[in-house]
Image: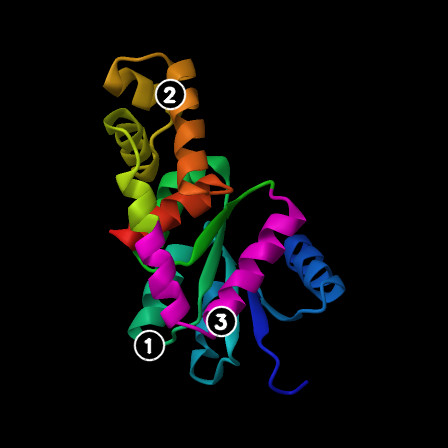
Amino acid sequence: MANEPIVHVVDDDPAIRDSLAFLLDTADLVSRTYESAAALLAQADTLAPGCIVTDVRMPDMNGLEMVRRLSEMGVRHPVIVMTGHADVPLAIEAVRAGVKDFIEKPFDDEALLSSIRSALADLAGTAEREGQDAEVRDRLASLSTRERQVLEGLVAGRANKVIAYDLEISPRTVEVYRANVMTKMQARSLSELVRMTILAQ
C-alpha cells in the first residue's frame, strides 16, 4: 500500500541492516535501510511517514546526535534506539532527548517488533497517550520510598551494584526492589520502565 508507514533502519553494519530488513519483511512491515545517520538526514525533508530504528553507536555521528538533528529539522518520527549493555546511560540520555524507546542488544525479535508497532500506533492517537501518562503517575505514587530510590538509580543509568553502594544495601536487595518496581509500574523491560518514568515527569 502506498500510504503504509515505513520503518527507517539506520545502522553502519550491513549484516544488521539486512537481518533487520528481513525481520521486518517477515512481520509484514515495510522498511528502508540507511548505512549512516548522514544518509538518513540527507533525505529528512522527504522522509516517508513511519518510525526510525537506529544504532546508538555509529562512526561519524551517533544515534543521539542524529535525533537532535532531526528534531532541529522538524522531523517528528518516533525513534527507537538499539544499544549495547554498556551504552544504557547513553540510551537513557536519548530518551530524555525525545527517543521513544531503546532496545538492549542482543534483543528478542518480538521485543523489537512490539516496540516498532507501538511507535507506529503512536502516530495515530495522542488523547489515549495522555490517559496512559496519568496511569503511570498513579503507579509512580504507589512506590515505596526505597522503591523510588532504586527507580531513580535505574533512570540515571546506574548499575545494580552502584545503586546498592549508594543506598548501603546489598545488590541482591536492589534486584528485589527492581523486580517490585517493574511489577508495580507494569513495565516489561528496563527501557520501557525508564521511558515511562521520564515521560510521566
Residue located beneath label 2 in the image: 174
Range shown magenta:
107-135
Query: Measuring 32% from the left and 34% from the top, which residue is drawn there?
Result: 151
Front position among marks 3 and 2: 2
Residue 129 belongs to the span the image colors magenta: yes
Quarter-of-image position of residue 178: top left
Find the residue positioned furthest to the bottom.
2
Per the model, the C-alpha gap separating discs 2 and 1 is 41 Å
Label drawn at residue 73: 1
Residue 103 belongs to the span the image colors magenta: no
Amino acid on which disc 1 is placed = Met
Amino acid on which disc 2 is placed = Val
Query: Measuring 45% from the left and 62% from the top, which residue is drawn there?
Result: 79
Disc 1 crowd, CA 10 A, few/some/many (<14, 14-19, 20+): few
N-terminal of the two: label 3 or label 2?
A: 3
N-terminal of the two: label 2 or label 1?
A: 1
Quadrant of the image for the N terminus? bottom right
Disc 3 crowd, CA 10 A, few/some/many (<14, 14-19, 20+): many
